[in-house]
Amino acid sequence: MLKEIEKSKLNSLYEDNHLIVPLKKRRTLNFLEKIENYKNSDSMYKNMDLHITEENIIRNNDIILNIEFYCQDDPSRVIDEFEVYGDQKLSELRDAFICPTEPVDLFSNKAVERDFNKIPSSFFIENVFYNNFSDNIKDHYSSNIINWVYKKRRFLQPGLGRFISKKMDDISFKDLSIRMNYPYLYIHHNNCKHIMIFTNVRLVHKNDDRNIKNYPKLIYKGWIKNNKCKLCANKLAKWITYDDMYASDNPCIWCQDCFDNFHKDKDGNLLYDNFKILPLFIYPSYSIR
């Protein structure tokens, strides 16, 4: 039996692979493993993943933070939760977070390319705006707010302060002064706002993923309930019509197939045009965590 196990290709059967096996398949330990040389224990992780090197390994003295993003329309619902490490830049978290209201090309059903050099975004944490400064961005969300606060010394009023701005690419999470379970703000895409909360901070544990390439690590994503076509109630809606004589509701949302079947001839030409039609940008609702 032992010989058969040694021939097995299942990672879960090998002690050396314990940390890269999915959590549910890991062998539960009922004792503390002895570490012969604690100071050099980082070296044990390099052998578990061929892609881990001295340059991209998280050290023992680093920290792991948990950050939750909340739905703009319903601040009580969590959209995403990430794990980040202390040396990680704020801009990397910005890149990892995908808002459901970001533009989508409904004709090709592909996400629009995310060019952060053209789209302003900002984290507002403890009276500091961490912006993505770029020559292609002429106006930042923070500019008008900071000017307004300093005009007529409004920063002396309760709830305001001496707001400043910094570049998010230069700031790591370990550089922040934060309060746990306190609401901060992420602003992007035409003034779309998300509450963000730091829910946990701790030292790196020996069972943590030490490969920095895997961070920010998405550990929770809210279940999305999308809008379905009003007619077939099966496919996702892509169009919304107003004052449409063939529609069951006003306004009415349609999937591509139902819209084509009701509004176009065999050559793809509209049968009538005395109604308004717009592409539907879906704002999903999220289940309660």
Image (cartoon, grey):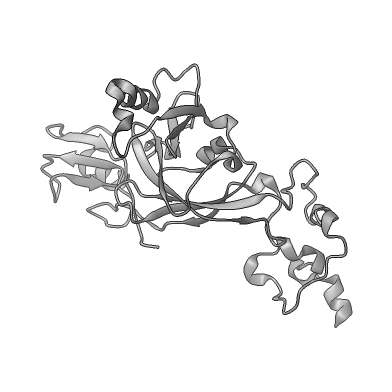
Q: Position of residue 53 (x, y in %)?
A: 80, 45
Residue 115 visible in rendering? no
Picture quarter with the N terminus: bottom right
**The quarter of the displayed image where residue 265 is located:** top left
- Is 76 displayed left or right of 24 in the figure? left
Image point (32%, 44%), residue name: 282
Q: Which quadrant is the C terminus positioned in?
A: bottom left
Residue furthest to the front in view is 156
Q: Position of residue 150 (x, y in %)?
A: 34, 23
Instruction: Return the x and y of residue 226 as percentages of the image width and height.
Output: 33, 53
Residue located 83% across and 70% down the image: 34
**Residue extending farthest bottom:** 1
Q: Residue 124: which quarter of the image?
A: top left
Res 238 quadrant in image = top left
In the displayed structure, does residue 264 sit left or right of residue 125?
A: left
Residue at x 77%, y 63% (from the top left corner): 17
Task: Give the vertical position of 136 relative to 7 (above or below).
Answer: above
Q: How many marks?
A: 0
Q: Is residue 72 above or below residue 169?
A: below
Q: Nearer the viewer, residue 197 or 126?
A: 126
Q: Is residue 199 left or right of residue 31?
A: left
Asked whether residue 36 is in view, the answer is yes
Identify which residue, 20 or 268, lies in the foreground: 20
Q: Nearer the viewer, residue 29 or 260?
A: 29
Vertical order, 116 against 250 (above or below): above
